């Protein structure tokens, strides 16, 4: 039998190079956070300069300062145009571990999301539910055994009969599984996607302009 040395293949370049600012690991995929220390990835300086570089139309030679699908002078369509869209999503940043990105709603958060945590036995199979309605995120406890909290205030548990959905804001703290003193065993920080924040800012400015 002939043993052949296995050649380790490097990552395929399928996207812009992103670097973890803490451990300096390089990612080529669509990852947002580092899989080792949970830090938010940043684009390399060379990639940022590449994205800011003006685009020249191959048909008429007109220089576009911002990427467009069609040239405004001759109407040429750029085949390699990729419109950047920030999907509607919400991220839960734990005190330790890998952040959880949620981009499908409604989403039932439960034990499967914290199965590796040593407090996972206190989390219900479906603990809380996230919804996205009219441009806002909402959270609601599903009458869980140990309850949950929002910014330190209990929002669910066995003693609650009518559980209301509460609106989430960027930077809120969600607590899962409360102990006897009302302290959460698991805590997550809420991070809302830029698409939703920019949409909220534009609608807020429109309302102020109407006044």
Image (tube, rainbow, N blue to C red):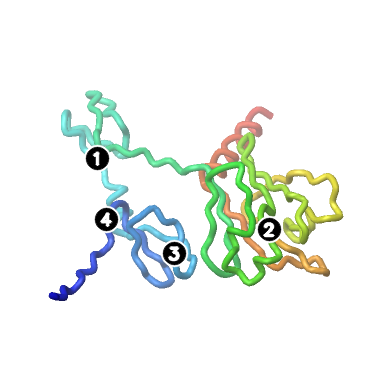
Which is closer to the viewer, label 1 or label 3? 3
At x 69% / y 47%, what residue is drawn? 139
Q: Residue furthest top?
A: 74
As displayed, is residue 140 above or below residue 80?
below
Sooner in the amino-acid sequence: mark 1 or mark 4: 4
Sooner in the amino-acid sequence: mark 1 or mark 2: 1
Q: In which quarter of the image is residue 179?
A: bottom right
Q: Is mark 4 on a helix, strand or loop?
A: loop
Per the model, the C-alpha gap separating discs 1 and 4 is 22 Å
Question: Which residue in the protein does label 4 denote?
Answer: 13
Per the model, the C-alpha gap separating discs 2 and 3 is 22 Å
Circle number at residue 174: 2
Sooner in the amino-acid sequence: mark 1 or mark 3: 3
Circle number at residue 196: none
Question: Which residue in the protein does label 3 denote?
Answer: 34
Front residue of 19/114: it is 114
- Pinpoint residue 15: horizontal percent, then vertical percent: 31, 52
Question: Which residue in the protein does label 1 denote?
Answer: 55
Circle 3: is it few (<14), some (14-19), or many (20+) Cα within 10 Å? many
């Amino acid at each position: 039998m002939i043993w052949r040395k296995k050649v380790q293949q490097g990552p395929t370049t399928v996207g812009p190079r992103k670097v973890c600012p803490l451990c300096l690991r390089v990612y080529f995929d669509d990852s947002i956070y580092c899989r080792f220390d949970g830090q938010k990835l940043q684009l390399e300086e060379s990639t940022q300069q590449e994205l800011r570089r003006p685009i020249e139309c191959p048909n008429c030679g007109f220089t576009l300062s911002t990427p467009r699908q069609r040239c405004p002078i001759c109407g040429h369509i750029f085949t390699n145009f990729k419109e950047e869209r920030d999907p509607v999503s919400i991220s839960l940043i734990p005190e330790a571990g890998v952040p959880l990105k949620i981009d499908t709603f409604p989403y039932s958060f439960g034990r499967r999301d914290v199965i590796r945590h040593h407090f996972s036995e206190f989390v219900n199979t479906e603990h809380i539910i996230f919804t996205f309605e009219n441009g806002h995120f909402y959270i609601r406890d599903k009458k869980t055994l140990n309850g949950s909290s929002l910014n330190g205030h209990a929002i669910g548990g066995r003693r609650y009969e009518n559980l209301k959905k509460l609106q989430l804001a960027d930077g809120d703290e969600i607590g899962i599984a409360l102990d006897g003193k009302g302290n959460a065993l698991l805590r997550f920080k809420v991070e809302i996607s830029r698409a939703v924040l920019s949409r909220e800012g534009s609608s807020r400015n429109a309302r102020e302009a109407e006044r």
